[in-house]
Image: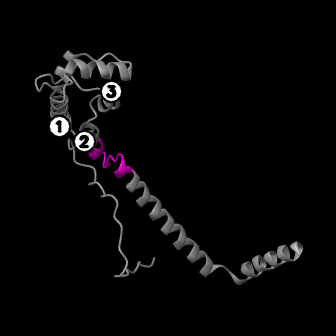
Amino acid sequence: MTRRTVNPNQNELMFFEVPAAMHSNAGGLDMALAVRETLTDLLGAASVQGCDRHEVAARISRLSNHEISKHMLDRYTAPSADGWRFPLEALPALTQATGDYRLLELVAEACGCKVYRGEEAMLAEIGALTMQERNVKARLVDLRKNIPDTVMDRLVAEVLKRLGDKK
């Protein structure tokens, strides 16, 4: 495998960062406290914006078609309510109800992923497509360099034959 040489006159475009590797040690993915704290912060921010826990619960219930109450939100955030866990299936509804992506970002990061939205998502897609384009071009160059002469002769003969039929 050959190493790519970098042209100092060419700018490299880095559209997104690579998230850190997932934790592999035992218990490294225990997120109970982090989820509670993030959910508490998220609900507090929603409250500051005029959307209290009653309203957030109603929105989640309406969006997810599963009943979530203010009391349940209180239990999900309480450090003493260890048996209560915020349901994963309610995460999209919570995110949409509050417009806050912090809990989704926390979960994604723990999985070794990153959440992009809006312009960030478009830039990440452009970056991914640019990388694919570079890989395809490099593969085409490699194939063209290494194509056997007999195959190339057959292709040229076929093209000349088709061009001759058109005249």
Disc 1 crowd rating (10 Å Cα; few below 14, some 14-19, many 20+) is few
Q: Real-space Cα distance between discs 2 and 3?
A: 15 Å
Disc 3 crowd rating (10 Å Cα; few below 14, some 14-19, many 20+) is some
- Considering every residue shown, the one lying at the far left of the view is 80
- Residue lying at 28% horizontally and 34% vertically, measured from the top left: 99
Q: Real-space Cα distance between discs 1 and 2?
A: 8 Å
Residue that carries the numbered disc 3 in the rendered image = 90
Q: Label 2 near label 1: C-beta < 8 Å?
A: yes
Label 3, secondary structure: give it.
helix
Above or below for 86 versus 3: above
**The disc labelled 2 sits on which kind of residue?**
Leu
The mark nearer the N terminus, 1 or 3, is: 1
Q: How is the image coloured?
A: one colour
Above or below for 84 versus 116: above
Residue that carries the numbered disc 1 in the rendered image = 34
- Residue lying at 20% horizontally and 34% vertically, measured from the top left: 35
Magenta residues span 107-121
Label 2, secondary structure: give it.
helix
**The disc labelled 3 sits on which kind of residue?**
Ala
Residue 135 lies, in percent from the top left, at 50, 68
Disc 2 crowd rating (10 Å Cα; few below 14, some 14-19, many 20+) is some
Count of marks placed on residues:
3
| Nearer-the-camera pick, 110 or 101 | 101
**The disc labelled 1 sits on which kind of residue?**
Ala
- Residue lying at 41% horizontally and 78% vertically, measured from the top left: 4
Label 1, secondary structure: give it.
helix
